[in-house]
Image: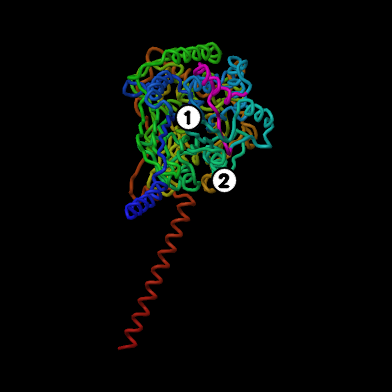
């Protein structure tokens, strides 16, 4: 009896520690996510005749996923605006945030394009969204987000709400003259560093971050960037102290295949405690999550082409197991949600009645047609683009047909690959499609779209611009240039910043389109008028710093003095209105009428001649000081090596002679 009792006590003694050390409780989290939506309310046509994206179809897939995962969070990682005509409602209606609210988004973070209307425009957008929200629900609550949860628990889901906005390291700079207005707008909306959200018995901690490159891409934001690593760690620590069990970062930083260039990869490596990063800005599509330590990083592509979904099992010690990861296509096979479709149609009507009415156009108006696709090239390909050439020709056409009192001087027009935001597929081309190609920015008039501006460059600087295209494009595809009124040749195997072998001015003829004729020499010291979009013009002055001082482009006014105010360089029509980039393209397309886009735009026309010859004569033709300097250094190294070899051989010979 005593022996049995002792054995029982021994067994219990062994079992108790085991029970105390059993595995921690496993929980499951599902996050539905997007990023870089860029105001793509409607589906985008694809080159194969299909469609991608569209908020009414996104709504359908979101509902399906929420039925499958009732406790799923819905999050966005920024750049939800600027990319279609709907952005013309940004500051007055807050259409993007209001529609995201209808789609059931829990939270988002600002991207760089949320500041295309500068910091003040961001504040105006927040106010527009808040005022519309309060007009509907203001009588119900005094505290926006907490009261929403209480109301929904008692009465069910709201038919209108707004997503929370979080950003921990990007706030108005003290030097911003609109700082007070912007901060008040952010406070009124409820913008915070972090958000605590309870869902399915789990407390989530969510915070937002802006990346360094995103900040660099928002030069007019008037916002100051804090160190994102310090900000992120502070958020993680604060959220855990408040009881957060699972930490999510909405980052507009981006990823890269090179770990050293991947801002969000570096963030995950530097900050302890982030469970999931939803990564925007680089428009990346990650077929599988990137895992850095205990942090999962996800991206689902641009323009709502996919809805991302990730499901993780996890425990309180940080251990995680991937259960499921899907990129769900949003295409023509998905039925549209009727409520969201109706809302989008309402927004579209407001665009036509407001912004487009000033141009005598409507959203779906057919401008012309094309019997072929007009595309930008694959990344890094330097042999031209029929779309890029069409756009640069449109700018030159606008100088002759839209600009009031255009000076009678030789003009070169230019656009860059990085500002061409959409292609034009075969078929009818509408107003909205033309806008989508050049949808970036805002003018001095406060309305959507960058205006065309005219500056002056010397002939030497024009050649340097061609050199930027030839030398920088392989490492920065967005820098690829397309010109009208100028032709040039370069060899991709020549010395960096000395790849252009020849350049000429090209005389255009305006009739039903543009045709090419005689070439004339470019005089190094003569001033030439250059017309481009506002953003590209402002970037000309950065070439010197970007090229480490090897190239220099200084925008000037007609008398040769430096440009001090680009707004004074804006092209205007006979009524004094800004000539927008997108409208120059739309009007040029409309000039083709029923005949359609001329067939000479089917392929690049050779105004940019690219060679990869290894012929020594071509490689060394017309060397500049950079090539001569490198050749001089190379020659000096060769002479040095030859002399060293000679000295060594002489010493060996003397040793042999002394032994003999």
Give how far across and how far down residue 572 sits, in percent: 59, 21
Q: In the displayed structure, does residue 594 sit left or right of residue 252? A: left
Q: Residue at x 55, y 15 (%)?
A: 355
Q: Is residue 602 magenta?
A: no
Q: How would you rate the neighbour count of disc 1 (Cα within 10 Å): few for under 14, some for 14-19, many for 20 or more?
A: few
Q: In the displayed structure, does residue 631 sit left or right of residue 577? A: left
Q: Is residue 166 magenta?
A: yes
Q: Which mark is residue 199?
A: 1
Q: Residue at x 45, y 59 (%)?
A: 632
Nearer to the camera, 325 or 50:
325
Mark 2 secondary-structure assignment: helix
Q: Which residues are magenta?
A: 143-169
Give how far across and how far down residue 347 sits, in percent: 50, 15
Dot 2 corresponds to which residue? 230
Give how far across and how far down residue 604 sits, in percent: 37, 30
Quarter of the image that includes the C terminus: bottom left
Give how far across and how far down residue 535 sits, in percent: 54, 32
First of labels 1, 2 by sequence position: 1
**182 up-or-down from 629: above or below:** above
Extreme residue in the left direction: 660
Nearer to the camera, 20 or 525:
20
Does the rendering let one see residue 525?
no
């Amino acid at each position: 009896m005593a022996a049995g009792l002792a054995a029982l006590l021994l067994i219990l003694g062994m079992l108790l520690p085991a029970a105390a050390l059993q595995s921690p409780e496993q929980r499951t989290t599902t996050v539905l996510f997007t990023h870089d939506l860029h105001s793509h309310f409607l589906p985008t046509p694809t080159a194969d005749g299909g469609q991608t994206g569209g908020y009414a179809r996104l709504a359908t897939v979101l509902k399906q996923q929420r039925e499958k995962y009732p406790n799923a969070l819905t999050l966005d990682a920024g750049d939800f605006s600027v990319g279609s005509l709907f952005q013309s409602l940004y500051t007055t209606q807050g259409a993007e945030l209001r529609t995201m609210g209808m789609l059931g988004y829990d939270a988002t973070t600002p991207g760089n394009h949320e500041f295309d209307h500068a910091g003040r425009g961001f504040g105006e957008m927040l106010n527009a969204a808040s005022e519309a929200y309060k007009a509907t629900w203001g009588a119900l609550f005094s505290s926006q987000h907490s009261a929403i949860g209480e109301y929904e628990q008692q009465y069910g889901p709201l038919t209108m709400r707004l997503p929370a906005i979080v950003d921990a390291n990007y706030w108005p700079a003290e030097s911003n003259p609109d700082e007070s207005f912007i901060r008040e707008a952010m406070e009124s909306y409820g913008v915070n560093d972090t958000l605590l959200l309870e869902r399915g018995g789990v407390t989530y901690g969510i915070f937002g971050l802006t990346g360094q490159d995103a900040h660099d891409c928002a030069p007019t934001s008037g916002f100051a960037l804090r160190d994102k690593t310090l900000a992120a760690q502070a958020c993680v620590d604060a959220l855990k102290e408040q009881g957060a069990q699972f930490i999510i970062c909405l980052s507009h930083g981006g990823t890269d295949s090179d770990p050293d260039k991947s801002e969000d990869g570096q963030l995950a490596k530097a900050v302890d405690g982030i469970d999931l990063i939803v990564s925007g800005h680089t428009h990346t599509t990650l077929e599988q999550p990137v895992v850095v330590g205990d942090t999962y990083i996800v991206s689902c592509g641009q323009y709502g082409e996919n809805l991302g979904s990730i499901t993780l099992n996890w425990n309180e010690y940080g251990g995680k197991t991937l259960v499921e990861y899907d990129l769900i296509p949003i295409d023509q096979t998905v039925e549209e949600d009727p409520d969201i479709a109706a809302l989008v149609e309402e927004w579209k009507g407001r665009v036509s009645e407001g912004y487009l009415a000033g141009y005598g156009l409507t959203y779906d108006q057919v401008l012309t047609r094309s019997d072929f696709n007009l595309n930008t090239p694959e990344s890094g390909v330097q042999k031209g683009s029929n779309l890029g050439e069409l756009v640069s020709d449109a700018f030159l056409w606008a100088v002759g047909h839209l600009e009031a009192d255009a000076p009678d001087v030789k003009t070169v027009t230019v656009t860059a690959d990085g500002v061409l935001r959409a292609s034009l597929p075969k078929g009818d081309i509408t107003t909205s499609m033309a806008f989508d190609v050049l949808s970036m920015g805002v003018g001095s008039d406060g309305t959507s779209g960058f205006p065309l501006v005219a500056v002056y460059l010397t002939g030497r600087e024009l050649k340097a611009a061609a050199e930027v295209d030839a030398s920088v494009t392989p490492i920065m595809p967005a820098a690829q240039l397309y010109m009208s009124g100028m032709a040039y040749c370069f060899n991709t195997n020549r010395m960096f910043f000395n790849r252009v072998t020849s350049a000429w001015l090209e005389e255009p003829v305006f009739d039903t389109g543009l045709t090419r004729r005689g070439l004339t020499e470019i005089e190094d010291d003569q001033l030439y008028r250059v017309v481009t979009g506002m953003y590209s013009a402002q970037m000309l002055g950065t070439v010197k710093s970007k090229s480490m001082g090897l190239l220099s482009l200084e925008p000037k006014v007609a008398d040769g003095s430096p440009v001090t105010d680009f707004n004074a360089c804006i092209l205007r029509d006979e009524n004094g209105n800004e000539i927008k980039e997108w409208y120059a393209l739309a009007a040029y397309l409309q000039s083709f009428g029923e005949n359609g886009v001329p067939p000479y735009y089917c392929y690049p026309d050779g105004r940019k001649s690219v060679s990869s010859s290894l012929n020594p004569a071509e490689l060394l033709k017309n060397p500049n000081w950079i090539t001569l300097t490198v050749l001089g250094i190379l020659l000096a190294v060769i002479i040095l090596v030859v002399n060293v070899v000679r000295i060594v051989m002489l010493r060996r010979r003397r040793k042999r002679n002394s032994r003999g």
